[in-house]
Amino acid sequence: MKRVLLLLPTTGYRNDDFLAAAKQLGVEVISVANYCHQLAPSWGMSPIRSVPFDQPVAALKQLQTALGRKPDAVLAVDDSGLDLAALLCEYLYLPGNSPAAVRQTRDKLAFRNLLRRGGLHCPDFCHLDSDAEGAKLPPQLRFPVVVKARRLSASRGVIRADTPQAYAQAVHWVRGIQAKADRDAVELGLIVEHFIPGSEHALEGLLHQGRLRVLALIDKPDPLNGPYFEETLYVMPSRLAQETQEAIARTVERACALA
């Protein structure tokens, strides 16, 4: 029987789907979770149930001593476990994306720099470090802008600002959101980028040996103009023209190749 190590965040809404799929496929699951390290022992949990996903190097050391037989694969069920999954695959000599590639695609600032170096289109942007004054817009940008936390997903810590007052407030709020979610918040700082209006789409796919296999292209019909960017309605199959869908897929594949 195949054994898969699943990184299951305690707040994840996908966990049950992955566990159900594993059961249906007859796959043995090693469940690794990020419960509080102080509470987990009193609840009778093993060390692999209180692993700090946001500190992947420390988490890897903890798992090195706690894991038994080597799994056949490691999967993170959401963004919070991707860095740790990459380190585990490297340590266990399992197929997977390199830790460096994962870090570049998870970090919005690193990803923007990656796109720029690769000649792909992206908005004008700048890094706002934690010591920078948040009341004045960086001189290379013009309103409207979007202030973003660097490593959060699902539109958390993403706020549009159209005026200096709104910008100062957005910086204050996003810094607070990032500080609560990421222990590296002070070192990370924020990213500020020019707001680009228009439709938004999401591509779901699998990358195998550098080739992209598109699973679905999803339309987001609600106008996403801010100031907040709640992800609400998703429509599939996409209503875009086929040539546009193919162009999106080619661009995504090219961005993946850069990492």
Image: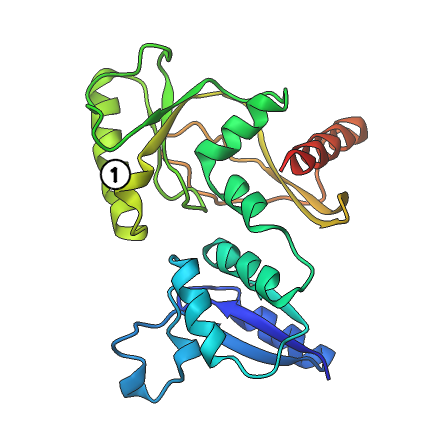
Question: Dot 1 lies on which element?
Answer: helix
- Classify residue 92 as left or right of residue 113: right
| Residue that label 1 marks | 175
Residue extending furthest toward the bottom: 44
The N terminus - image quarter: bottom right
Which residue is at 63% across, 24% downward? 118
Q: Quadrant of residue 88?
A: bottom right
Which residue is at 40% across, 70% downward? 51
Nearer-the-camera pick, 259 or 25: 259
Picture layout, residue 1 above or below residue 178: below
- Classify residue 247 as left or right of residue 147: right
Q: Is residue 231 visible?
A: yes
Which residue is at 52% across, 79% downward? 67
Q: Quadrant of residue 151?
A: top left
Picture layout, residue 164 above or below residue 6: above
Q: Residue 90 in the image: state x and y as whole percent.
A: 60, 60
Which residue is at 68% across, 45% downward? 236
Picture layout, residue 238 above or below residue 69: above
Q: Residue 242 in the image: state x and y as whole percent.
A: 80, 31
Amino acid type, residue under disc 1 in the picture = Arg
Nearer-the-camera pick, 87 or 219: 87
Q: Is residue 53 visible?
A: no
